[in-house]
Each structure stands twice: as structure tokens, then as C-alpha cells.
Image (cartoon, grey):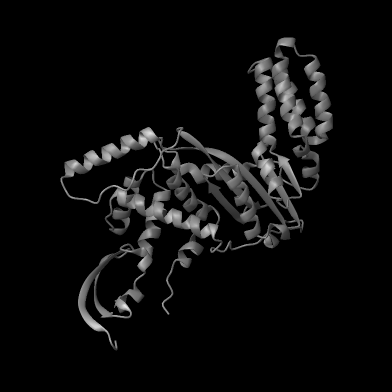
Amino acid sequence: MKNQHNKGRQDYTILTINGRVRLRRRRWHSPGAGTTAPLDAWVDAVEASISLGVREMACRLNADSKNFDKAAANLARTAQIDVSGERLRALVETEGKKVIQVQRSAQLPVGWSAAECATPAGPTRVYFGSDGVMVPVLTSAEKQTRRRKIKEKRRRRGRKVRPLPAAKTGADQKYKEFKIVAYYDEAQEHRLVAGTRGDHEVAGRLMCREAARLRLDQADEKVGNVDGSPWIRNQVAQQSLPLDALGLDFYHLSENVHKARRAIYGEDNEAGQVWAGAVLHTFKHDGYDAAWQQLLDWRAGVRRGQRPTADQLLNYVSDRREMIRYPEFQAKDWQIGSGPTEATCKTLTARLKGSGMRWDAANAEAIMGLEALSQSGQWNLYWQSQLRPTG
């Protein structure tokens, strides 16, 4: 320690999965280098007072818990690590935001590429899906109420604590649509999913970013299955996503056919059931043109007062004409449903939709980012990437 002065010892504590560890480190000072503590090279400074192991365990338990207090109780029970629900909340949300930053900077490897997604028949194939899902968020009025309750609780404790951070502006509605993007292979052994609280433009850039990360262009077959929302189709085109085909999810087509059936025939009318089944069979096996003519003939026989309902179905179908390609998809052994994407929407937002839950949009996105790690098979890759080199 040449030219450095001994500034004495200082206590340092860190919460680890083995309990709280107290260290005593010696500090040194020189005019040129300032104050240093050699022991810091062995302590992950990014973790502040909580170790990497505790952070991962907290995030794992939170994902399967109904609330942060429950997750904190589970952490205390399983690992004898005592933190409050509020402390655990801040820890998990901070980690989730870090995950999002790592993903945006492309620092985290995907772990697979499109060239690895072989099918039983031989060609490599990757599916693309995207959707919107509603998430409960805090309005400005709810934020003010929550902030007031926290202040009252602090006053009752009678202890001096740090002041609350500056208030953030809340949402203008109780629910906001988050966007989901998913890529997966035929057997779903390889998956890459992500979510954003941003608008359709942000989602479009996310589609493009994830496609580049897994080298989508290297797949022999690149197939999209979506619900037909205009914003998805527009972003696929705007981002020049290298898809061979973009198909309309058969379930969503079926939903619209049955919606028209119920409005015109009634819920349990047998003739309506027969009509809907025949139309969907034609779409699935004979294609758009045959089904379109079938719908036109049907509309002509509908009572005048019910024709607006029939026209809604025809407009829905005609607006998605280029996406209705079921015979072609089946001939190539391609899936015609977006079930994996729908399932992803549920899993990525399951933690956000508990009874009475309301979220700050940025925090909700952070929780979703952690779940996306797990759904994409990147959980271990992320935590390994957080280990600080000991060189």
C-alpha cells in the first residue's frame, strides 16, 4: 500500500442466503487515488447490502406468490432471511428493471438460434406471435391515496425514516394494454418471449430486436399466427419482419363466426350451430374464396334487421383476407392457432392480476420481465451473467 495511509477498520454487512454476514474491512487513502478498501474487490458492489443469491431467491419466490408479504414470509421460512414485504418488493422490481435493461442492450444471449429449430420432417421452423393484454395499473388518484396511507403508517410507527421518493404520475385509466411478443419452435422446446408497456411502435421494435437476436432469417420456414389486430399486421410490415406467411388464428375467426351466430340465431339454436360448423369447415378446408361465397349467400337470406350483424362478420373476414390461408398452412404442416402466444400472455401477467392488485406501469413491466426470463429459458443465464469476475 505504498503512499497510502491507513484509515482504520470499518464494519460492512451483507445479507446472503446463509444469513447476514458482518465483515471488517481496512480502508486506505492517498491524495491521488482517494479512499479504497481492498476487500471490496471480493464483494459485489452492485448488490449493495443484499447478495446475488438472496436476490435470485426473492425473485423466484415472488413469481409464485400472491403478494410481496407472502413472498417475504416464504423467504423467512425457507431460508431464514428476514426482510419486509416492502423491502422485497423494491428488491424484485429493481431486479426486473435491470433485466429489461440487459435485454434491451442485447447483453444476454438467447441460448438458441432459428437454425436449431428442426421439425420431424426436416426443415427448420420458427413461429411468431404477438398480442395485447390488459394489466391493472394505478391511476393518479390511487397513487395519492396509497401515498397518504404509507405516510400515516410511518407516523404511527414513530420512527425516523427516509422520506418517500418524489411522487410519480399515475395512469389515466385503471387498465392499460401491454404488448407481448413471442417466438417458438414446433415443439416449444425453444422459446423467446418479451413484453412491453410501450405502444405499438415500441412493440414493433421489440419484434424486430428479438427476431435479430435469434437470427430468424436463418430458419427455413418462418410463420406468424396472430389474432388479426391491425396494429400487429402494420408493425410486421413496417419492421419488415422476415416472415414467409402471417396467418389469422383459427380460434379468433371461430369466435367471430359464433358471435354472429348467437346474435342472429340465438345461443342454443341447432340451425345456427349447423351453419357455424359448415362455415368454419369451409374456411379450414376449402379456403377463403369458397367461404366468402358461402357467407354472401347466407347474408342474402338473413332478415333485413339482422343484416348489420352479418355485415360485421363479412367486414371482419374481408379485412383479413390475406391472412386466411388454412388449407395452405395445413398442407405445409404449419400450425393454424396462436395458442402458445395466448398462453404466454397469461403466464407473463399472472403475477400482476391478483385480487385487488394495482401496479405502477414501470413496476408491472419489471415483474413481467422477470417472468419472461423464465419462459424464455434464460433464468440461469441471467443470474450467471450477474456474477462479478474475481480476477
| Direction from residue 272 to residue 166 in the image, left or right | left
Displayed quadrant of residue 55:
bottom left
Residue at position x 61%, y 50% in the image: 205
Please state which of residues 104 and 75 is positioned toward the viewer in this rendering: 104
Quadrant showing the N terminus: bottom left
Q: Can I make out residue 15 in this image?
A: yes
Q: Position of residue 24 (x, y in %)?
A: 23, 74
Q: Position of residue 10 (x, y in %)?
A: 21, 73
- Residue furthest bottom in the image: 2
| Direction from residue 151 to residue 121 in the image, left or right | right
Q: Can I make out residue 227 in this image?
A: no
Residue at position x 38%, y 58% in the image: 57
Displayed quadrant of residue 106:
bottom right
Q: Is residue 203 above or below residue 296?
A: below
Residue at position x 45%, y 54% in the image: 97
Q: Is residue 255 above or below residue 84?
A: above
Quadrant showing the C terminus: bottom left
